[in-house]
Structure formats: C-alpha cells, structure tokens
Amino acid sequence: MPIKQLVDLPNTVPVHSVDRMSPFHFWLHCRFRDKPLHIRGAASDWKATKMWTPSSLSALLSDTDVIVATCKAGVFDYNANATTGLVHEREKVPFSEAVDAILAASTHGEHFAYIQQHSIAEKFPALQEQVERPECLDPSKFLNEVNLWLGSAGCFSPLHFDELDNFLVQVSGRKHLTLFDKRDSPRLYPNVGQELAHCSMIDLRHPDHARFPLMVGLQAYAITLEPGDMIYIPRGWWHAVHSLDTAISINYWWSGIFDIFRQGLQSVWSTEGRKEIALFLRQLTSREGK
Ligand SMILES: O=C(O)CCC(=O)C(=O)O
C-alpha cells in the first residue's frame, strides 16, 4: 500500500547533501558547521545494503527473539504523553514472526509494526560481519551502540533528540526525516518534567499551532533517505522519522574521547554516582580496619 509522504512545514530547507566525505572533511564539518549532513550513497557498496531484505533477515535470524511494537496509528511514541497519547503494544516473538507482521502491515496499511533499536552486537551477532564502520568516521571515535531498525511502511518515530552523535544509514526502503536545530529546543515543547524530556509534545504529522504557538515559523530541515544513503544527526538535534516503504536501517551512536570523559564525570557527579563512590570508600576502609 503506497504511503503518503507528510507535507513539509512551510519554512523547510533540504539537509545539505554531499557524495562522499573524508574523515578530515567530516571533522571540519562537525567542528565548524554542527549541522546535519546527508551523505548520498555512503553505504551503497556495503554487504548489508546489497544483501539485506526483510525476507533474507527473516531466513537468517528466524528463531531469534525480538520485541515487535504494533499500533494502529503508526506513531511509535517513546511514552504515552509525548504526542498522541496512543500507546503501542510490545510483544516478544521470533524474528520471522515479527517480519511476517511487518510485511502484512505494509500490505494492508491497517496497522503498523516495528522492530526498533535492537543492538546488533547483542541481539544479532550473525549480522555483525556485514555491518561496516562509516568511512567518514575517524578511527579515534567510539561506536557506543549500533542498532537495527526494521518496520512497515508508514511507521513514524516522533520528534525527539539524542544525547550522542548519530549516523542513520538506510539499508532498504526510504525514510523521510524532519529535523530542527538544538538551539530551537525552547520552541519545540520538550516533555520537561516527564521521564522522557528528550521527546517533544508536538505531533509533527498534524502540528497544532494553537497549542504550540512558538513552533510557528521555525526553520525545519528535511531529507528523504534512499537505500544506501546516510545522514549525520548531531547530538541534540531534534528529528522525526517517517518510513515511506518497508524499511531497514542501521543507526550508529558514537562519541569522541572527550565526550566519554564528560559522560564519566557527569555520572560520577550524579547522585547515584556519588552514592556508589561513598559505598566503595566505606567498603575499602572497613576492609583495611580488619
Ligand atoms: O528510524 C527511525 O524510525 C528512528 C531513528 C532514530 O530516531 C535515530 O536513529 O535516532
């Protein structure tokens, strides 16, 4: 069933596109532009892009358990408060059963099914060898998490941001992304005070300007990823993702050595971190006293 692409907001410009990026030029981009970047065909030679289809993955991973989320509205909120209030169901099933549900959902269009953000290293080690490191990422950077996404046409991941830099690689099918600058956060109605403050309360599919007046006129950025394309999403940048076809993607959250120090310091400085240090020191001194 063909999926209607959502209409872009009035003040939308395309994400800047390039054909290739060396690690040095990518470093310059991150350092001085700090904006999303579309790298056309970055993954078109990868084994994953050449070999993965929902059916080939289903054959390879048939009995592996996965969590498949299903819902009628197609919006895969991270919590019920974020946008629509429509909660989706999650069920643990064998991979092949999840793929059957995804393909049936794409064909009939009455409901939507999504395998979201499953760690490839932890859940699908058999795929590891077919997953490459993006060429533009210099060797000093760490891959914190590499995840598989496989969902039916029409699945919508609502507006949110992540704490880490991200590459979203389109392996099969197309996805349309809408992005906003992290500096515009105050105008994007984060779910502040709720557990998921990195999610916006705005439903970008039907923006309610009366309820969210500050978003009117905001500069949006948009891009449609074709198979083999990749987008760099800088940490903190807001993004919503709409699958136009049955789609397979890989996302990479990565960081540099200074980010790791910063995160380490932040967690040490958190209440939990301080409690752990206090406990460790108590254990150390009581052992020495014996
Ligand atoms: O592809 C999707 O549906 C969501 C991906 C995403 O939000 C991400 O990679 O951060």
Image (tube, helix red, strand yellow):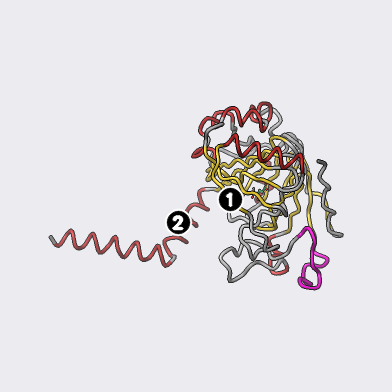
Q: Which residues are magenta?
A: 204-219
Identify the mark at residue 152; answer none if there is no mark.
none
Residue drawn where x is 61% and y is 50% of the image: 165
Q: Is residue 80 above or below residue 157?
A: below
The residue where tag 1 is placed is 90
Quadrant of the rendered image containing residue 21: top right
Quadrant of the rendered image containing residue 248: top right
Q: Is residue 54 above or below residue 93?
A: above
The residue where tag 2 is placed is 264
Q: Is residue 141 visible?
A: no
Q: Quadrant of the N terminus?
A: top right
Q: Return the residue nearer the eye: 190 or 21.
A: 190
Q: Return the residue nearer the eye: 220 or 86.
A: 86
Three-letter amino acid code of the residue under disc 1: Arg
Q: Residues within 10 Å of mark 2 (few under 14, many from 20)?
A: few
Left or right? Give the position of 51 relative to 125. right
- Magenta segment: does it hold 209? yes
Residue drawn where x is 62% and y is 48% of the image: 69
Residue 30 lies, in percent from the top left, at: 66, 49
Residue 227 lies, in percent from the top left, at: 74, 35
Instruction: Tell me the element at label 1.
Output: strand
Q: Earlier in the sequence, mark 2 or mark 1?
A: 1
Q: Dots 2 and 1: beta carbons under 8 Å?
A: no
